[in-house]
Amino acid sequence: MTDIPAGLPAEPTASSTVGARTPWRTGLRRFRRHPLAPASVVFLLLVIVGAVFAGVISGHDPNAIDLVHARAAPSGAHWLGTDPTGRDVFSRLLHAARVSLGVGLSAAALAVVLGAVLGSLAGLLGRWVDTAVMRLADIFMSFPSLVVIVVVAGVLGPSVPTLVIAIGAFQWPTCGRIVRGVTLSLREHEYLLAARAAGAGQGWLMARHVIPAALPPICVAATFATAQAVGMEATFSFLGLGIQPPTASWGNMLTDAQSLTVIASQPWLWLSPGIAVALTVLAVNFIGDGLRDAVDPRQA
Amino acid sequence: MGAYLVRRLATNVLVFFLITVAIFWLVHKAPGDPIAMRIPADQLNSGSAEYIAEQRHALGLDRPVFVQYWFWLTSALQGDLGYSLLNGRPVTELLGERIGPTVELMLIGLVISLLVAFPLGILAARRRNSVWDYGTAVVSLGSVSIPVFFIGLLAIYVCTLRFQWLPSAGIVDPANPGLLDSIRHLVLPAVVLGIANTGTYLRYIRGSMITELGADYVRTAEAKGASPRRVVYRHALRNSLIPVLTVIASNMGQLLAGAVVIEQVFAWPGMGQLAVSSVRQQDYSVIIGFALLVAILVLLFNLLADVLYTVVDPRVRLR
């Protein structure tokens, strides 16, 4: 965010050693200069470790019901207390991280693939394909995916695939626009013309030239998409339209907190998943911000 | 201007038809006999087999799918969205009594978020790369990152349970109604909705202001000796409103989505609450009516964004 335009050659301090000028290194240095991105990476790694080793770390079965110790406040045995059926909140929190990150990453992946394909098609083919894809992008951008999920989950029943598809399908336009922009600027380059003259088809051009060139901005968009997808999953599950109990997700752990008594007297039930979602989404967004600084200093 | 708007109108109509096809597909996929959505439950239960068959024919339900779609669409556009599977009331009526509270919540929420976003966005743009700029960047990222329902729960915890400043449920206290009471009920949901949307507007206002402040006419104004205040508010702000207005209009769908969640948290009797409870009770006709209404609203606001764009920016008319 702060940098002097960092592509400039005059910056003799750090780059005296051989090989220090690679794009990777400059990018990494700019990333590390972001005030919050490096700390966010550490935090996210902790969340991922917690999610992967959820069972070992928590030492409790996330679905084990223990009515004797229901609604227990945080203690040595249950670090974050227990819920109304006596399940360990900390264990559920870690297992929920798997679900939330899983849904977030797969939805973002879907969005990136859709966006990359549609965006490069629009850029390469131009004319009516371009108009159609871009109009479609406008509509998907302005249509609230929440309403779509309400309708689809309401009629067909909530499920994880529905959730991932609904989130992913409404995230592709951001990525699609980026890829289209890169494609349009690439079209003017001679090497693309050369590739075409050598007989390359649209598929080859897309896979070999357009997508690699668009990769850095795609990574940034994918990061932001993941953050948004994690937040959406939480929202949908909170409303009862996403992950269904007994499987824990950060969103559905908060569903129980809709009564005033729970909010007032058992804050561990809603504060911990709420803080988990908020911090995770924030961290991923900060990483995206840092990545953007790293790949494109003009944007900052 | 005319040709541009006509083109936009035409695409919007096309999109509307595509959306109705998608929604009708869902009507078709919904479990149960479709006739249950189209006539009130008491008639369905008491009516003779002949009566039902007659109704089925009158509603086109014994015809091919395409004809069924046409029957469904024409009656929906005339305001007949069928009947609730739960209580047999017309869906139009159910949605009609819920739309007011939702619009109220959305409008006040929008005003609150703009009241926060404009000063902060202008400040951030004027003092680029200062502490203020970083501060607002964190505020805006926080506002888009923290899920709205969590902000809502925190607000309830602090404002209602801890300090008992404000009520956190419903739209009015039946024991003690009045204007002041309505305002007190509105504060928490509207402020939370406002906070959740501030980040989006803030980012666009900042970006748009930065572009305008770098424009030649700003330098001209400064060279003529206009005060910084005048340059910012009279010259740059006016022009930076153009993209911001479009963003506000096309963000209406997201605002509505936020309202749906907030209605759930604060027991606000709006459309969102109706929709979510209909999902829980599998009241398909209400869900589908809600979807159709939202689709129409979103498309209308998109069209409004296009119109605004051409009205405030003469350059667009030339295209």
Image (tube, rainbow, N blue to C red):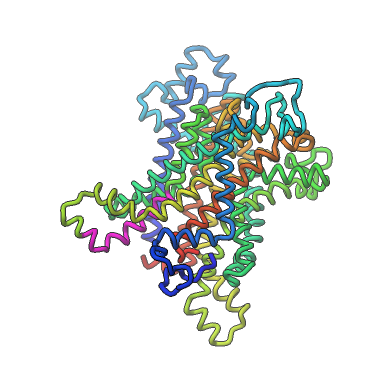
Can see residue B260?
yes
Question: Can residue B275 be seen in the rendering of this structure?
Answer: no
- Seen from this angle, which residue lies furthest bottom? B224
In x, y percent, where is residue B296? Answer: 49, 44
Q: Position of residue B239 (x, y in %)?
A: 52, 70
In the displayed structure, A297 sits above or below A125; it is: below
State the residue at coordinates (27%, 51%): A208
Q: Is A187 contained in the magenta span?
A: yes
Taking the view exactly as shown, the residue that stands out farthest to the top is B49
Figure quadrant of the C terminus of chain B: bottom left
What residue span does the magenta drawing correspond to? Answer: A173-193
- Identify the residue at image location x=68%, y=21%: A65
From the viewer's perspective, tell me whether residue B132 is left or right of residue B82.
right
In this rendering, the answer to whether B20 lies above or below B111 is above
Q: Is residue A287 above or below residue B44?
A: below
- Seen from the viewer's position, the closer of residues B246 and B174 is B246
- In the foreground, A29 or B235: A29
Residue positioned most to the front? A17
- x%, y% of residue B89? 60, 28
Quarter of the figure with residue B206: bottom right
Residue B97 within the magenta-colored segment of the rendering: no
Number of disc labels? 0
Q: Residue furthest left?
A: A198
Instruction: Kindly report the secondary structure that dominates the magenta region of the rendered protein.
Output: helix
Comparing B143 with B270, the one in front is B143
- Residue A300: x, y in percent? 50, 64
Quarter containing the N terminus of chain B: bottom left
